[in-house]
Amino acid sequence: MGDGLSIQSCSQCREPSILFQEYSGQHLCGKHLASSIRKRVAKEVRLQINLPKDARHPDGTPFRIFVAISGGKDSAVLLSMLVDIIGQRRDVEIISGCIDEGIDGYRSPSLELARELSESLGVQFETLSYEEMGYDRMDNVVNKMDVIGENNPEAKGMMPCSYCGVFRRQGINALAEKVGADIMALGHNLDDMAQSIIMNFQKGNIERSVRLAPHTDDPIEGLAPRVVPLRWIPEQEIHAHAISSNLPIHDGDCPHAPGAMRQLSRRIVADMETITPGSRHGLLHSLDQIRKLYKEVNPVKSEIKNCVKCGEITSRKICQACTMKRWLEEN
C-alpha cells in the first residue's frame, strides 16, 4: 500500500494545519488562523475607528456601530470579530442588519442565518426589504431589464448587480440612519478590495478607487462613515476561519451574479495571486499610496448634493436610485 495522506502541521504548534498562507509561508491550524485574523482586524479597528476611552455621547447614549451582514462568510466573521474585540465595552453598542433584495431561494435562507448569528452573539438585528424602500423585488427587476435597456440608452447593457448595488447602498444607509449609527462596518475582504481596484483601473476611474472605504478620515456629512476591518484578510482565510469556528453561514451564490464584471476581476486577481503571491496586498498598498497623493493634488472635495426627489446624498441632481426607480415604474 502507498503512503497515507500527509497533513502538514501548524507552523506555530503541532496541531494539523487547515490553511497554507502562501504569501507568508506559514501553515496554520484553526486556533492560530483565528489569532492571526483577530490581530489584523483589531489593528484595523484601531486605525479606522477612533474610539476614546469613553466613546459615549454627551447624552449618555453609546457609540453605535452598524454592521451590514448578509448571512455570508465575510460579514459573519466581521460581526463575530467585532463582538469579540470591542463588544464588551459598555460605551459601544453593535447592531447588525440585513437587506432583503427579493431573490427567491437565495436571500431567505441567508437572512435567517444572519438572524441566527446575531442572536447567538447577543446583537440587535434589523432588516429592510427593497419593497419597503419603494423599489421592486430584484427578481422582478431582472425580468424588466431588457425592456428598460431598449427604452433607456443609459440602462442598455447594465447587469443585475448594477441595480442591486445602488439599491443595497440606499438600504444600508437607511438602516444605519434608523439605528442612529456613528459608524457603518462592511465585510469587504482583501480579494474584494483588489477586485474593485482592478475594475476601476480598467475603466481609468482612479477617483472611484480613492473613494473606496474606509471613510473615517474623510467623512461625508449626513452619512455614517464606512469602515472595512477585513480589508487585509484574504477570502480563503475568512472562509476557513468561518468553517473552523462553526459560524452559521450561507454558502450559495446569487443566481443573478453570473456575467457580472466582478466575476472577471475575481479571476484576474486569483491568477495574479497564483503567479505572484502577495499581489492582492500589493494592489491595496498601491491604492493607499495613490489615495495620499490624490488628496495632496486635489485638496478640495467634490461637491456633494442632495437628490431633489428623495433627499439622499448624491453627486447628481437626481440620484441613480431614483433614476432606476423611474425606469422600473415606466416599464
Image (cartoon, helix red, strand yellow):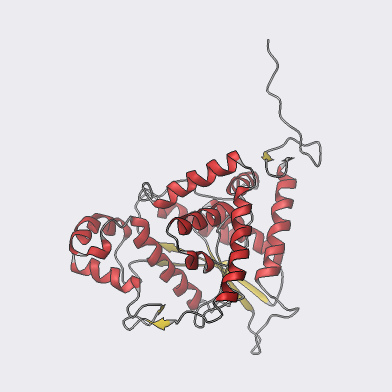
Residue 171 lies left or right of residue 215; in this view the side is left
Q: In this rendering, does residue 87 appear at all? A: no
Residue 273 x/y as whole percent: 59, 43
Residue 258 lies left or right of residue 175; in this view the side is left
Residue 124 x/y as whole percent: 56, 68
> Which residue in the rendered view is the most extreme toward the right?
13
Quarter of the view holding residue 158: bottom left
Along the viewing direction, whichever of 117 and 102 lies nearer the viewer: 102
> What residue is at 50 percent from the left and 78 percent from the top?
223
Residue 207 x/y as whole percent: 49, 68
> Which residue in the rendered view is the most extreme toward the front?
297
Along the viewing direction, whichever of 292 and 218 lies nearer the viewer: 292
Task: Indicate whether 320 appears above or below 284.
Answer: below
Query: Which part of the image, by quadrant, shows the C terminus?
Result: bottom left
Along the viewing direction, whichever of 50 and 269 lies nearer the viewer: 269
Quarter of the view holding residue 53: bottom right
> What residue is at 53 percent from the left and 54 percent from the top?
192
Residue 169 lies left or right of residue 82; in this view the side is left
> Which residue in the rendered view is the most extreme toward the top?
1
Task: Indicate whether 25 appears above or below 87.
Answer: above
Task: Indicate whether 218 appears above or below 270.
Answer: below
Query: Which part of the image, by quadrant, shows the N terminus?
Result: top right
Residue 220 x/y as whole percent: 52, 79
